[in-house]
Image (cartoon, grey):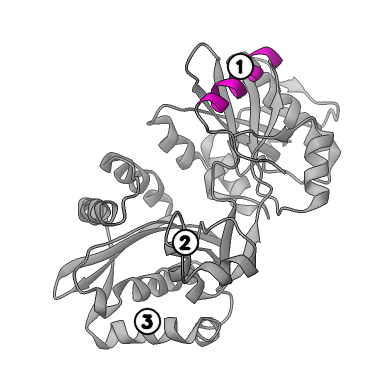
Amino acid sequence: MNTNGPALIAPDTSLEITNPQPDPWDRFVAHHPDGHVLQTSPWGGLKSEYGWRAERVGLTRRGTVQAGAQILIRRLPAGLGRLAYVPKGPVVDWGDESLLKPVMDALDRIARSHGAMAVTLEPNLPDEPQHRQGLRSLGFRPSPVGAVQPRRTLVVDISGDEEDILMAMKSKTRYNIRLAGRKDVSVRQAGAEDVSTFNALLDATADRADFGIHPPAYYESAYRLFAPRGWVQLLLAEVDGQAVAGLMVFALPPRSWYFYGASSSAHRDRMPTYLLQWEAMRWAKSLQCETYDLWGIPDQDHETLEDQFTERSDGLWGVYRFKRGFGGDLVRTVGAWDRVLSPVRYRLYEWALALRGRVRSTD
C-alpha cells in the first residue's frame, strides 16, 4: 500500500484507512483485548527476513488506530500467485460492523494488489459456533490446509500470587520445580550473546526428538527484533555453569507466550525444564502479564488428551505430557479461513494440495 498517496475513506467518514507506522500500530495491538504478538511489527519484521512481505492496514480516527491487521504475503509455486495470510488477526471488535467490513475490504484490496488468490485469516477467536458463522457470513470458508498456528493450547492464569499459581499445577510438576532448585539448577536471564548457546540446545533437541527447527539466524533475529521493546526474554537453565535447557518467552502484557524451548540430555534427572518454565512465568508476571500461553498441544478434546497422553509420543503428544502439569485452561481457536479472490487459481491450489496429500479435514 502506498503510504504517500491519499487515504481511502471508509463509509464512516470519521475513519481513514491508512498504513500505520510501527509505533502507533504496536501501541494499538498491545492495548487491544484481542491483541496478539503475531500481529506486532517485530513479528512482521521477522517474517520479512524469511520470504514474506509484511504490510499493515489500520482504521484510524483522528490519528488513533481503531482496528486493523498485519498481513503477510508470500509467493506460491507453480504460477498460483501469492498467499496473503493474517496470523491471529485482524485486530478488531468482531461485533462492530462499522469497523469489521472496512478492514475486510482493505485486506481484499491489499491481497488483490499483490496477486493473491485468497485472503487467509487465522483469527484470535475461540472456536465457537457464532464465530464460525460470522466468518462464513463474511465470505470465508475453512482453509483446506487447516491451521497454520497450533489450534489448541493451554493458557495458564498467572494473575494470582506465586503460591496460587503453583497450587494450580499438578503435584508432580510442583515437586519437579522444587527438586530442580534443590539439585543446584539455576536459571538466568540471558542476552543476545547467548542465542548461540540456545541454538546449540535446539540442535540437540531436534536430533534427539526428530523435529524441525528454524535456522540459527531465525532465533537471533527474533531476539534482536523483540528485545529492544522488552517483549522477549531468553532464559537458560544451568548446572555448574553448563547450559542444559533454554527457552524464549514473548510478552505483550497482559499476555505472554512460550514459543521456543530446548534442552540437552545432560542432567535431565535434575528437572531443569520445569524450573525454566516456572522462571519464565515469573518473568512474565513481573511485566504484569496475567496469562501464560504454553502454545501448542494435540488438537484433541480434554477426554482424549487425558486418555491417550501416557501412551502416545507422536506429534505434540510428548510436549503435552510435560505441559499439562502446569495446569491452565484448554483453549481452541477457530483455525484458518480463506476468502477466495481468484476461484480458478484457488481450485488449482486445492488440487495441488490434494496431490501432495496436504489437505486436512475441515469443520
Query: Is disc 1 surrounded by few (<14), some (14 to 19) or many (20+) residues within 10 Å?
Result: some
**Of helix, strand and loop, which one carries label 3?**
helix
Query: Is disc 2 surrounded by few (<14), some (14 to 19) or many (20+) residues within 10 Å?
Result: many
For label 1, the residue is: 348
Q: Amino acid at mark 3?
A: Ile
Does the magenta run of residues contain 90? no
- Of mark 3 and mark 2, the one earlier in the sequence is 3
**Residue 80, numbered circle:** none
Up the image or down, 132 lies above or below 280; here it is above
Quarter of the rendering containing residue 271: bottom left
| Mark-to-mark CA distance, 3 and 1 | 52 Å
**The magenta segment:** 343-355
| Quadrant holding the C terminus | top right
- Of mark 2 and mark 1, the one earlier in the sequence is 2
Quarter of the rendering containing residue 84: top right
Q: Amino acid at mark 2?
A: Trp
For label 3, the residue is: 177
- The nearer-to-camera label among 3 and 1 is 1
Q: Position of residue 253 (x, y in %)?
A: 55, 60
Please name the residue shown 58% across and 75% down the image.
159
- The nearer-to-camera label among 3 and 2 is 2
Task: Work out whether residue 298 can be spotted.
Answer: yes
Q: Position of residue 120 (x, y in %)?
A: 63, 32
| Mark-to-mark CA distance, 3 and 2 | 21 Å
Magenta stretch, main secondary structure class:
helix
Up the image or down, 11 lies above or below 40; here it is above
Up the image or down, 323 lies above or below 93; here it is below
Q: Amino acid at mark 1?
A: Leu
Q: Position of residue 265 (x, y in %)?
A: 21, 66
For label 2, the residue is: 317
- Of mark 3 and mark 1, the one earlier in the sequence is 3
